[in-house]
Structures are given as C-alpha cells and as structure tokens.
Amino acid sequence: GESVGLHLPTLSVQEGDNSIINCAYSNSASDYFIWYKQESGKGPQFIIDIRSNMDKRQGQRVTVLLNKTVKHLSLQIAATQPGDSAVYFCAETGQGAQKLVFGQGTRLTINP
Amino acid sequence: GAVVSQHPSRVICKSGTSVKIECRSLDFQATTMFWYRQFPKQSLMLMATSNEGSKATYEQGVEKDKFLINHASLTLSTLTVTSAHPEDSSFYICSARRQPGQGKKYNEQFFGPGTRLTVL
C-alpha cells in the first residue's frame, strides 16, 4: 500500500548547524510533497512543498530536495535555531487524490 | 489568510459520554475537510474525508457510527465521538482544503490547532 516513511525518528543538532531530515516514499504516482512542522500540542504547520516536476525548492532557511529515481525527499534547515525544535513530517499526495499520506515524523532537537 | 480553528482545544469527559469537536475555516470556503487522529509520538492518521453536503468517507478501520462527521456548510465540519472510551483519548486534528479556484497551491490543506480529548 501507499506509505511514506522517515529514515530517522530523532535528530539532534548543534545550534547554528544545518539539519537534514529525510523521507522515503513508496508511491511512484505521488506528485506533490509537503513538509510540515509540528510543535508540541499544536497542529501541523506548513513549511515548504514541491511538485514532482522539480527536484529542488528553496524557502527561507529551508530547502526541499526531491529524488524521484529513489523516491526520496529531504528537508534541509540552515543555521538551525532553538525555535526549530519540533517534529517534522513529510506528506505526499497524488494528482486527483484528496488525501495526504503522512510519514512517521522526525523529532528535531537543538543543542545549545 | 487560510486560518482553521478548532473548538474546544481541550476536553475531558467521562467514559460513555459523547463529545463534539468543531472545525471551522475562518477566512475561506472549504468544500473538503479532513479529520485526523494522532496518538502520542505517532504520526497523523487520517480518519475520514468530509465533503460539504455529502456523507463522509471513512478510512479503513474507522467506525463511522462511533465517529460521526457532519459537514453542513462550507466553513464548518463537526466530529462527534460517541460513547467515548479511554482508548479514544487522542489528539484530533482537522484540516480544510480551499474550494477549487481559490487556492494558489495544488491540493493545499490548512490545519487546525488540534483538540486534546481525554476520556476518564
């Protein structure tokens, strides 16, 4: 069945370093991918998205890379700050599909 | 723009009672709303897809008679947990998708802040 998974459940980085969070997906029909940030006790917050016709997209301090050959998605956060501490989820959907399929999530913790 | 609210944010109830959770899109019309459940340290699990004016589509394993969903308007969907039990304790999150034509992004969903349900 469809599934989206993450390689690492937890990631700990030093403040100021770059963070890389990975995600694998299995549905080759997926053509739209989103990264969400979820802080404790809150709903998911949109970070960045990418369509399958792109392999890279940049936002403010964040970059998403998409490798369709190996069905891999990553989120890069530059100069990680304490406020970046959260659980990060990737999600995918396909053209015409209404629903999002969420990955397992990676908890990002920042060391001072 | 694109704000989704949920009410209540937190609810504690006794086993056997029913609890209603509201999801509202505050500044846009949502033809489709989604209800998710999230257990501690786990991902979001889609429970059902709710289309305005029609019956909700439930995911496999979700009891439609236990989790009643009503989407009577383009800005409001409700989830009622009937005869709640301690195992229903969870974080319930809704999302809303813009009506076609208004959105700037493909299939974009906007999430509410969640409702923490505790059943004693």
Image (spheres, grey):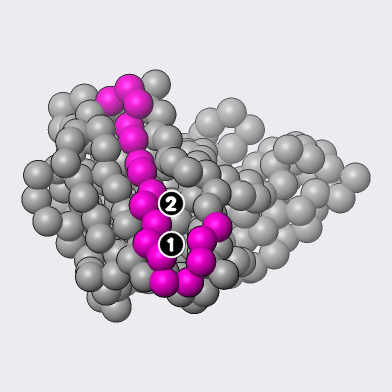
Q: CA distance from mark 2 to mark 1?
A: 6 Å
Q: Residue at x 49, y 47 (%)?
A: B114
For residue A102, say whether it is visible: no
Q: Earlier in the sequence, mark 2 or mark 1?
A: 1
Dots 2, 1 in contact, CB < 8 A: yes
Report x, y in % for residue B63: 27, 74
Q: Nearer the viewer, residue B87 or A82?
A: B87
Numbered badge on residue B84: none
Q: Helix, strand, or loop for circle 2?
A: strand
Label 2: chain letter: B
Above or below: residue B4 compared with residue A85: above
Q: Which residue is at a point 28% across and 25% down the rendered structure image? A: B28
The residue that mark 2 highlights is B93
Residue A50 picture location, percent across and down: 39, 43
Residue B22 among magenta residues = yes
Q: Is residue B71 visible?
A: yes
Q: Quadrant of residue B95?
A: top left
User: Which of the image's four quarters has the C terminus of chain A?
Assistant: top right
Q: Which residue lies at the image location 72% right of the left edge and 47% below the top edge?
A: A85
User: Start and end of the magenta stretch?
Assistant: B12-28
**The one of A26 and A99 positioned closer to us in this rendering:** A99
- Chain of the residue on which disc 1 is drawn: B
Task: Say left or right for A32 vs B89.
Answer: left
Residue under pointer 1: B37
**Considering only vertical position in the picture, is A84 above or below A28?**
above
Quadrant of residue B73 within the rendered picture = top left
* B91 lies left or right of B45: right
